Each structure stands twice: as C-alpha cells, then as structure tokens.
Amino acid sequence: MEHREMAMLPDKRIALVAHDNKKLDLVGWARFNRDLLAHHELYATGTTGEMLERELGFKVNRLQSGPLGGDQQVGAMIVNDQINFLIFFWDPLEPMPHDPDVKALLRMAAVWNIPIACNRASADFMISSPLMDGEYVRLIPDYGSHQGRSIPGLQSSATSDPRTVNEI
C-alpha cells in the first residue's frame, strides 16, 4: 500500500480519555507531566476533561462523555486530522456498555496511524520522547484505492433496475 506524509507540528493536539476506574490515574499522570502538556492543545471527554482542567489549571477542550458520543467525537477528529495523539487509559477488567465505541476509537487511531498510549507506562514513554516536542512526519496509508473500489453488484443493479432508490 502506498503512503502519504502528514506533518505533526511541535505543539500536538492530544486527546485524553479515561474510563471511570482510570480517571484518577490519568489525572495523576497529567499532573506529573503538567509542564510537558502545557504547550499542547488538549481535548478530553466528559468528566475527564473537567477533572483535568481543574487539576492542571489551563484550558482543556471538553467533548461529550464517552457513552454519550465523546469517543466517537474523538474518532471523527482523528479522521479529520484534528487529533495527533491519543492517551486513553482504559480499564481492561471492566465491561463497558459503550464497548463498540471504544473499539471504534482505537480502530480509527490505528487506521490513521495516530500514536496511542493505553496506560501510564506507554504514556510516560511517549510524552518523554524527543519526537513529542518536534515536528514529526507521520505516514498515513493512502486509502484512495479503497475509496475508489467498485462494489460487486452495486453498479449492475443500479443500471439494470429502472426504479429509483426511493421506489425500491
């Protein structure tokens, strides 16, 4: 598959997400890394955003709560190149009623080659990387062939059936 390049500027747009049992862990991590996070643009879902803003003392762009669509908002922002980095402290031991949204969010980060930290150790390694505060050229798969693919049966049925879609 071909790739295209997309530059990430030194000031990253970071999404911070945490399940209920991991919110205090994420807030503690953010407090410890406050100076490293201060010049980046932060986004967070629901209560997590409120807690982070109060703890850090600077603006955090707050989205909806995860179960109310916040995870999907972050996923859409990744697709639209509005998020460069995802820190998602998820709870692997607790079933989530919005688990499909969580999987979709992680899938979007993987599809668009966004760095993901899912726990404190991976977040520590990534936030302290020299790549974090510099420009980084990210390779994104070129999905042009997927987007332009022909779907078997779609064109033949559309041309052979004289009825409109509304009539079918």
Image (cartoon, helix red, strand yellow):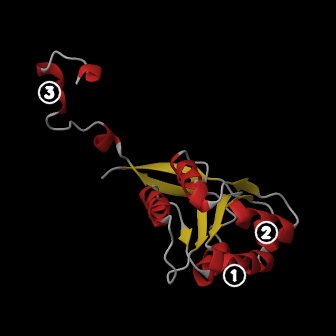
Q: Nearer the viewer, residue 13 or 89?
A: 89
Question: Where residue 156 sits: x, y (%)?
Answer: 12, 27
Residue at the spot of label 1:
25
Look at the picture and state if 166 lies above or below 39. above
Q: Residue at x 29, y 36 (%)?
A: 148
Residue type for callout 1: Asp
Which label sits in the foreground, 3 or 1? 3
Q: Earlier in the sequence, mark 2 or mark 1?
A: 1
The residue shown at (16%, 15%) is 162
- Report how many numbered discs are placed on residues in the image: 3
Left or right: residue 101 versus residue 160 is right
3D distance between C-alphas at marks 2 and 1? 11 Å
Question: Is residue 128 in view?
Answer: no
Query: Which residue in the structure is indicated by mark 3?
Result: 157
Say which of 161 and 33 sits in front: 161
Labels 3 and 1 touching (C-beta < 8 A): no
Residue 1 image offset from top left, x and y in percent: 30, 53
| Residue at image location 54% in from the left, 66% down from the top | 115
- What amino acid is labelled 3 in the image? Ser
Please give the label number shown on residue 51.
Answer: 2
Q: Secondary structure at mark 2?
A: helix
Of mark 3 and mark 1, the one earlier in the sequence is 1
Residue 87, position in %: x, y? 61, 69
The spot of residue 105 in percent (x, y) is: 50, 60
> Amino acid type of disc 2?
Met
In the rendered view, would you say 116 is above or below 154?
below
For this view, does 9 lie left or right of residue 168?
right
Could you say whether the residue bearing mark 1 is in a helix, strand or loop? Answer: helix
Real-space Cα distance between discs 3 and 1? 54 Å
In terms of depth relative to the viewer, which is nearer, 76 or 13?
76
- The extreme right residue here reads 57
